[in-house]
Image (cartoon, coloured by chain):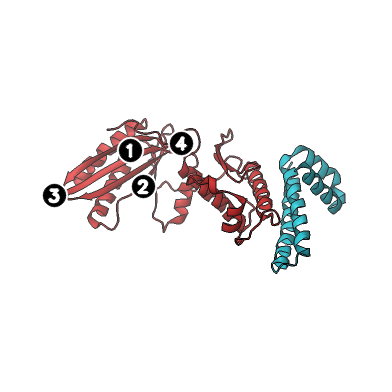
Amino acid sequence: MGGRIARLHDGNPPPQLILAALDTLLAHEALRLSERNRRFLSFVVTQTVAGHSDRIKAYAIGVDVFGRDDSFDPGTDPIVRIEATRLRSALATYYETAGANVPVRIAIPPGSYVPSFTWHSSDTGPTESTPPVNTYQAASANADLPAIVIKNLTDRAVRLAAAHGDLFTETLIKRLATAGFRLFAMPSVERRAAAIAIGKLLLHPDETYALDIAVHPMSAGQRFSWCATDLRSGEIICSDFVDEAERDVPCASSIDTIAAQAAESVSKALGG
Amino acid sequence: MEQAQKRGLTRLLLRWPERRAELRKKFARDPGFAELCEAYEVACEAEAYWTKSTLPVGPARAREYDALVSATEQDILIRLSLS
């Protein structure tokens, strides 16, 4: 079941990286933007990512972002035109200075309010210092192997599945760490700082893969699934599942076996 | 557009006479800076328009554009400081 399944994006950064780049950009203190120009930038980026770039017109921006009423006339009230130029200038300044090594760049080309998104390669490496959030990094981490961000998608409202999902995650981490991967676990929403740090890590997608796992309750058992994704292309590198029948006996050992199988398939797919 | 850029530059030359050489040099070399000059010109014209307006919203718009003129001046100074 392993192997390359789907190519979701071609050439340009994938939507999740564009939105992560937007979040990082808006959170960066070096970006000089007023609150409403931050809304302006968010508006045009999210509309474009959602496939609604045709809605990005001066009138819509004036009404939706700058609070103008239905009588808004961009001819006598050129607020959008002026703020767009200021926004372009702020972005250009940011990418020339603090954001020089940001890999996913957002720009608003002159003559339009529709943003463009491009990869930017850097010869000098990242400038931002990413906090060390890799709690699970193994002593034997192999520098030639990519980092993996693990996200447990199991529904926490289903207690048994949630408990099994935690066991599944723990064993996967142990196995993949032993194989030499650098591992990061996507934290809960309460741990926002760690989530932001991982978000920055995701901006270097050439070195990082996402591993989404989940335990799904079924009528007579559970499905343990895993899916590794190349963040640069959106391509699924490895995806599989194992259905486990309901048992009366403790199931930790069977979860360990499934996790070992998952770790082996992910390691193989990612070169471990 | 180009005319608006030049009018904006002219306003800035009058605004900061001690920085005229620097302004002209940056204007000639940096298209982004020239666009900021145009935005400055457009903001100044809009401020003048709304200051004269008899519409109820006129005074509020005039204040908004006055603030925008100042903010754009700051953007221009920052852009000017980049080599």
> Mark 3 against mark 1, which lies toward the viewer?
3
Label 3 with label 4: CB-CB less than 8 Å:
no
Q: Local crowd at mark 3 within 10 Å, few (<14), some, or many (≥20)?
A: few
From the viewer's side, name the closer residue of A144 and A55. A55
- The residue to which callout 2 is attached is A151
Label placed on residue A197: none
Q: Secondary structure at mark 3?
A: loop
Q: Give the number of the disc on residue A232.
A: 4
- Between the C-alphas of marks 1 and 4, the distance is 25 Å
Say if mark 2 contacts mark 1, CB within 8 Å. Answer: no
- Judge depth for marks 3 and 4 and give the one in front: 4
Relative to A226, is A115 on the left or the right? right
Q: Amino acid at mark 4?
A: Arg
- Tint applied to chain A in the drawing: red
Q: What colour is chain B?
A: cyan
Q: CA distance from mark 3 to mark 1?
A: 29 Å
Between the residue at mark 3 and the residue at mark 4, the CA separation in whole angstroms equals 40 Å
Chain letter of mark 3 equals: A
Image location of residue A122, percent across then percent down: 57, 35
Considering only order in the chain, which callout, 1 or 3, is on the residue closer to the N terminus? 1
Is circle 3 on the same chain as circle 1? Answer: yes
Earlier-in-chain disc, 2 versus 3: 2
In the picture as drawn, the residue positioned furthest to the left comes out as: A248
Residue type of the residue flagged with mark 3: Arg
Disc number for residue A247: 3
CA separation, marks 2 and 4?
17 Å
Question: Would residue A228 appear left or right of A13 to someone viewing this image?
Answer: left
Residue corresponding to mark 1: A178
The mark that comes first in sequence, 2 or 1, is 2
Q: Residue at x 44, y 34 (%)?
A: A143
Is residue A219 visible in the rendered image? The answer is: yes
Task: Work out which quarter of the rendered image holds the N terminus of chain A and state it.
Answer: top left
